[in-house]
Image (tube, rainbow, N blue to C red):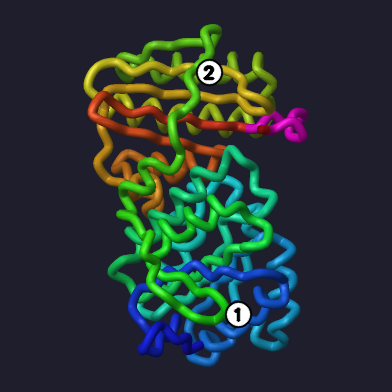
Amino acid sequence: MIMNSGHDSYSAVDIGFAHPALLYRDSAEFVERTGQLVADAVQASRPVLVALPSTNLSLLRASLGGDAQWVRWIDMSEAGGNPGRLLPAVLGAFADRHVNRHVVMIGEPIWDGRRAREYGAAVQHEALINLAFSNRRVTVVCPYATSKLSPATIVDAARTHPELIEAGRLSRSTSYGDPASVAAAAVGPLPDPPGDAAVLVIFDGHDLAKSRTFTKHHGRELGLYGRRLEDLELAVHEAVVNTITHAPGPGTLRMWRRGGSVVCEIHDRGRIDDPLVGRHAPGMDDEHGHGLPMIHQLCDLVHLQTDAVGTVLQLYMDIPQAVTRLE
């Protein structure tokens, strides 16, 4: 697919790394633009992954005819509910399976209907794509529905994508920001624990068993049960192991309920310098286990913020009977 950019011709599937935002007005334009991208990639024998919300996924798949069989299809509304899962488990995993080939991926992580609490993490994900694939033969095209999304969302798209495709024309984004800086600021201030949050101070490895008992007890009190409670217990265990292993001094584990979710916060005095921590392939972040990639897989939302004072990790697990009341 050749698109004009000033005096230059540009092909989104013929360069090393590309990460344009594709701005579309309606379903017809969406199908036209993305369909041509997929057809071009299939014709060039490039591996193709498409991760879209269910409606757009069905529209694009139906439009491709025989080419659809050569595409890896992912329902973004399921796989990307926690945007932190997307790099290690979806985009990165697919690119790693085709490490010696030019990979083309179409992903729509921000769509009308995504929960507001997930938005900052989705913007963060978009910014981090630029770091994760900067030296690889990877094209990631991200559609944005301009008629349904807010103007502020389109501004964020311009900040997280080096190029923009609009009406079939590609241009450099003059608002594109430093990926690490944009990612660090995307989520904004994390909510403070309420005064009645349950608290456990973590000192050393002897507190691992205490943290699991603490999580199970308070998770049940706050409304979790079964597999979701087990998953949260495992996620907190991984986070506490990281605190004990890497942070100087004690850490603090807090639990409370926020809307329809149980929130676990692990706060310590450690500092994380890698903006892609938790977004690498499983096993690369922590020599003692899967660490943050596993936490992202287990939890419904994960926020991590780090500065000179320390690191705060907040884990959200939805309460089953409360899913209709989520913020």
Specify whether residue 94 is in view. Answer: yes
Residue 206, image quadrant: top left
Secondary element under disc 2, as helix, strand or loop, is strand
24, above or below 197, in the image: below
Nearest to the observer: residue 256 or residue 163? 163
| Quadrant placement of the C terminus | top right
Give the left or right position of residue 94, taking residue 132 as reference.
right
Q: Quadrant of residue 77?
A: bottom right
Q: Which residues are magenta?
A: 318-326
Report the side of 246 relative to 86 (left or right): left
Q: Position of residue 8 (x, y in %)?
A: 36, 88
Q: Which residue is mark 2?
A: 255
Residue 69: image location, x then y, percent: 66, 81
Inter-mark Cα distance, 1 to 2:
46 Å
Horizontal arrangement in the rendering, residue 222 relative to residue 325 (left or right): left
Q: Position of residue 244 (x, y in %)?
A: 30, 24
- The residue under label 1 is 33
